[in-house]
Image (cartoon, coloured by chain):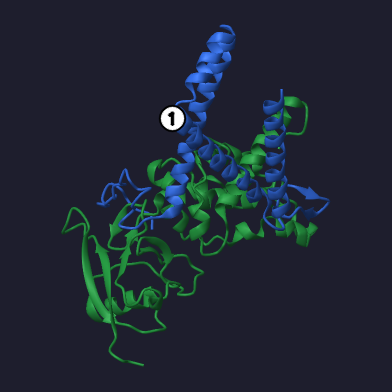
Chain colours: A green, B blue
């Protein structure tokens, strides 16, 4: 396999104990046709420079840990084939719109706080006892939210969203899509508890529909669609409650 | 990873003011088209102001209105109207295109029974209604 082809990988480095701002470092690694960018990073760490820091876990697009900017685009590095860039140089940076902790590792605290705020779990007004069995659902009811449940919290959509970059209060694509996923779930009764976060100025109304979140999503969740659906549903409900204030508010 | 912001020295990268033109050395066409779409509202607003002023002139008598109409025949005003029309078309096209987003297969908002109406029908309906409304308004303006 080894035919001595090489590829240059330029990585943004940030070592807070040594420097005040990130610098660049270029490594030349063997080019292999079946390698992804993450393989090249692991090769660097194992054989060239053990000080390089980055997150990864599953290597198969499930864990959502290895999201980075590859040549300016947010990508799961485990799914970005080196051959798609060869023979050009590959530039790897940490996901934008998040503070850098070290090298390619970002601080995801803000996202985790926002995710928690939308309560992405099934909320029941009253839990029924286990003896009454499970909450059942038809395939059609499952279809209503299934796509939005595929989110792996990789945060590529936050890196793609200029609104989040400019307005850090924005709840953001993934958190809204996940809140929407539970609002659409026939077993859930928690929509009122999520509305003050999702249907707020910092929620759906901050979104100006750039649409890039859906373009970069590796799981085809389409957060932009979740936001547009929530905008329409919220507006419809507001009109309904104006016209029929005595009606059932959802 | 949760961090203690008191003890961790993180680095936040600045965002360039020209992020919609060139972001980290790369041109993103969708960012550019997005900003162009935002810009359409400026031209739509300018046109509306002009239109309201024209209606206001009707209260000043037919001569004032006719003089104003005549002044609009100059090159710069014609150029402005063409640009405003192009922006208005782009604005309407993208706005109506959004209607498909609430209607992805299997989980859309508009349903007949349990069946979701296909997004293409929603898009065709929106664009169709737009074209029909345009024809009616154009007919009224040109014939009355």
Question: Is B106 situated above or below B130?
Answer: below
Residue A124 drawn at (x, y percent)? 69, 47
Q: Mark yes or no: residue B84 visible.
A: yes
- Left or right placement of residue A54 versus residue A15 in this view: right
| Residue at x 47%, y 20% (from the top left corner) | B71
Q: Residue at (57%, 62%) from the top-left corner?
A: A220
Question: Vertically, is B88 above or below B28?
Answer: above
Q: Circle 1: is it few (<14), some (14-19), or many (20+) Cα within 10 Å? A: few
State the image quarter where residue A71 is shown: bottom left
Question: Furthest residue to the top?
Answer: B60
Q: Position of residue B81 (x, y in %)?
A: 50, 32
* Front position in the image: A188 or B60: B60
Tell me if residue A83 comes above or below residue A193 in the rendering: below
How many numbered circles does the render carry? 1
- Left or right placement of residue B118 versus residue A71 in this view: right
Along the viewing direction, whichever of B8 and B13 lies nearer the viewer? B13
Which residue is labeled 1 in the image?
A: B75
Q: Quadrant of residue A47?
A: bottom left
Q: Residue furthest left?
A: A18
Image coordinates of residue B9 in percent, x first then y, are: 24, 51
Residue pictured at 46% horizontal, 31% vertical: B80
* Residue B132 position within the rendered picture, expressed as x and y whole percent measured from the top left: 72, 39
* Circle 1 SS class: helix
Residue at 58% over, 59% down: A221
Quick one: quadrant of the C terminus of chain A? Answer: top right
Q: Nearer the viewer, residue B88 or B81?
A: B81
In this view of the protein, can residue A245 be seen by the observer?
no
Chain identity of mark 1? B
Location of the N terminus of chain A by quadrant is bottom left
**Which residue is more in the foreground, A89 or A11?**
A89
């Amino acid at each position: 396999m080894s035919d001595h082809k090489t590829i240059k990988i330029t990585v943004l480095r940030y070592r807070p104990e040594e420097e005040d701002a990130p610098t660049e470092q270029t490594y030349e690694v063997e080019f292999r046709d079946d390698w992804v960018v993450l393989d090249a990073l692991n090769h660097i760490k194992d054989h060239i420079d053990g000080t390089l820091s980055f997150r990864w876990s599953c290597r198969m697009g499930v864990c959502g840990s290895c999201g980075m900017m590859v040549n300016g685009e947010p990508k799961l590095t485990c799914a970005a084939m080196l051959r798609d860039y060869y023979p050009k140089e590959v530039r790897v940076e940490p996901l934008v719109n998040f503070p850098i902790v070290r090298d390619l590792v970002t601080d995801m605290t803000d996202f985790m706080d926002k995710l928690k705020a939308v309560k992405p779990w099934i909320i029941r007004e009253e839990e029924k006892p286990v003896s009454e069995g499970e909450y059942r659902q038809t395939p059609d009811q499952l279809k209503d939210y299934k796509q939005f449940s595929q989110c792996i919290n990789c945060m590529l959509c936050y890196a793609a969203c200029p609104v989040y970059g400019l307005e850090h209060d924005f709840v953001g694509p993934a958190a809204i899509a996940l809140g929407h996923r539970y609002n659409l779930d026939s077993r859930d009764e928690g929509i009122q508890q999520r509305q003050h976060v999702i249907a707020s100025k910092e929620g759906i109304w901050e979104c100006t529909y750039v649409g890039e979140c859906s373009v970069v999503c590796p799981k085809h969740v389409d957060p932009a669609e979740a936001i547009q659906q929530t905008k329409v549903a919220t507006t419809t409900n507001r009109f309904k409650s104006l016209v029929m204030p005595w009606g059932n508010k959802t | 990873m949760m961090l203690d912001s008191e003890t961790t020295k993180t680095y936040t990268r600045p965002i360039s003011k020209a992020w919609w033109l060139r972001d980290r050395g790369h041109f993103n066409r969708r960012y550019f088209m997005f900003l162009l779409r935002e810009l359409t509202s400026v031209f739509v607003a300018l046109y509306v102001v002009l239109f309201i002023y024209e209606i206001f002139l009707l209260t000043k008598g037919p001569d004032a209105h006719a003089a104003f109409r005549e002044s609009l025949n100059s090159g710069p005003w014609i150029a402005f109207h063409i640009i405003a029309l192009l922006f208005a078309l782009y604005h309407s096209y993208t706005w109506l295109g959004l209607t498909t987003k609430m209607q992805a297969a299997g989980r859309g908002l508009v349903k007949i029974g349990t069946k979701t109406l296909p997004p293409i029908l929603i898009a065709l309906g929106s664009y169709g209604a737009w074209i029909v409304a345009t024809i009616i308004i154009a007919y009224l303006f040109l014939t009355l």
